[in-house]
Amino acid sequence: MKYSKYTLSSLLLLVIIAALYRVIPDRPWGFAPQFAMTLFCGSVIKDRKIALILPLISMLISDVLYQFLYMQGITSIQGFYEGMIWNYLIFGSLTVIGFFINSNSVNSILKGAVLSPTVYFVISNFVTWISGGGLQRSKTFAGLVQAYVDGIPFYGNSIVATLAFGLILFGTNQFVIKKVAPQQA
């Protein structure tokens, strides 16, 4: 699929801004544009390979930045960590949800904005619990429940962030399609 230089520039800018936003100090945990980006890319970008890879590139850039800041003693957050591959696999799979979003339907976007962080919350907290990561909760049902309780602050912020950043991404896209593009034709 051929992309214009403007489209490629916009996509590159999206990747960089999302990556930089994720490493802002003291931002609320889970409040980042990455989930909205997976939905947007999956919904709007017709080339599915590119739709899948762009959010992962954004995550990788931010993880490299986190690692650099960690090595400099500026943050306690490591960019590279045990279980990172699972995080990338779970996160990358969220783009598939975007494949089913109609970018012209507010209802479809809202459903995706709730579903994406929910899927991530359920799978990532289970994987963290079963692998002994995070707060290393006991391998009992009570330990699993506690692992989910531990993730609630991240989950709530992720839903709010996905709604907010989704509004920005999908709204800007609709504005460009309806207002800007017709004037340039």
Image (spheres, rainbow, N blue to C red):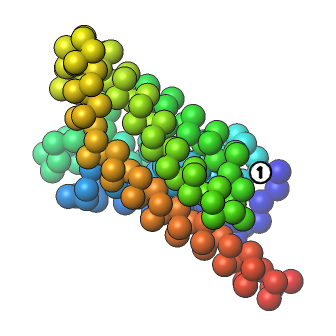
Residue 22 shows up from this direction: no
| Residue 166 against residue 34 in the figure, above or below | below
Q: Is residue 24 left or right of residue 51?
A: left
Label 1 sits on a secondary structure element that is loop
Please provide percent x and percent y for residue 58.
Answer: 48, 49
Residue 112 shows up from this direction: yes
Q: Nearer the viewer, residue 177 or 111?
A: 111
Name of the residue lying farthest toward the right: 185
Task: Give the labeled residue for mark 1.
Answer: 46
Disc 1 crowd rating (10 Å Cα; few below 14, some 14-19, many 20+) is few
Q: Which residue occupies 13% across, 45% down?
A: 73
Q: Nearer the viewer, residue 76 or 151?
A: 151
Name of the residue lying farthest toward the left: 73
Question: Where, by quadrant of the figure, is residue 155 drawn?
Answer: top left
Please provide percent x and percent y for residue 183.
Answer: 80, 88
Q: Nearer the viewer, residue 55 or 126?
A: 126
On the rendered image, what quadrant is the C terminus found in?
bottom right
